[in-house]
Amino acid sequence: MGQYEAAKVLGYSKAQTFVKIILPQVIRRILPAVTNEVITLIKDTSLAFAISYSEMFTVAKAIAAAQTNMTAFIIAGIYYYIFNFIVAYIMEWIEKKLSYYR
């Protein structure tokens, strides 16, 4: 509540107060939780499988069974690791950029 009073003293409108003061604080607070949810959604591909989308590990299992080797599983695992690493790296960079303690 103090932020609204301070913004009013500075002559900010309610919209300016929200955009310039409240929203940046909210984003900094929720970003770690959003990061975890994004990574979890990427890993939980069973949802994609449930909506009839061909899931990567299901395809890898079929290929591995047909070829009688594990190469398809290894490639799928490497892809998952790289994709999750990239998402985690980007989200960590954003969190550092918006950090209170720079």
Image (cartoon, rainbow, N blue to C red):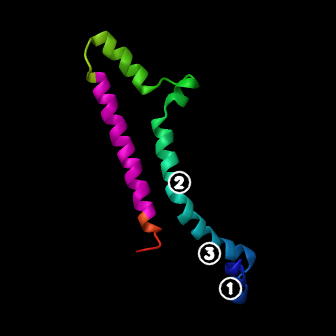
Reply above or below: 53 against 63: below
Tell me which segment is drawn in magenta. 72-95
Horizontal relation, residue 4 to residue 77: left or right: right
Q: Which residue is mark 2?
A: 33
Which numbered disc, 1 or 2, marks the residue that appears first in the sequence?
Answer: 1
Q: Residues within 10 Å of mark 3 (few under 14, many from 20)?
A: few
Q: Quadrant of residue 101?
A: bottom left
Q: Report the amino acid beneath label 1.
A: Ala
- Amino acid residing under circle 2: Ala
Q: Quadrant of the N terminus?
A: bottom right
Look at 26% across and 22% down and name the residue there.
71
Disc 1/disc 2 C-alpha distance (Å): 29 Å
Sort mark 1 into few (<14), some (14-19) or many (20+) by Cα contacts within 10 Å: few
Q: Which residue is mark 3?
A: 20
Q: Which image quadrant is residue 13 in?
A: bottom right
**Amino acid type at mark 3:** Lys
Is 90 one of the magenta-colored residues? yes
Q: Which residue is mark 1?
A: 6
- Counting residues from the start of the chain, the first of labels 1 and 3 encountered is 1
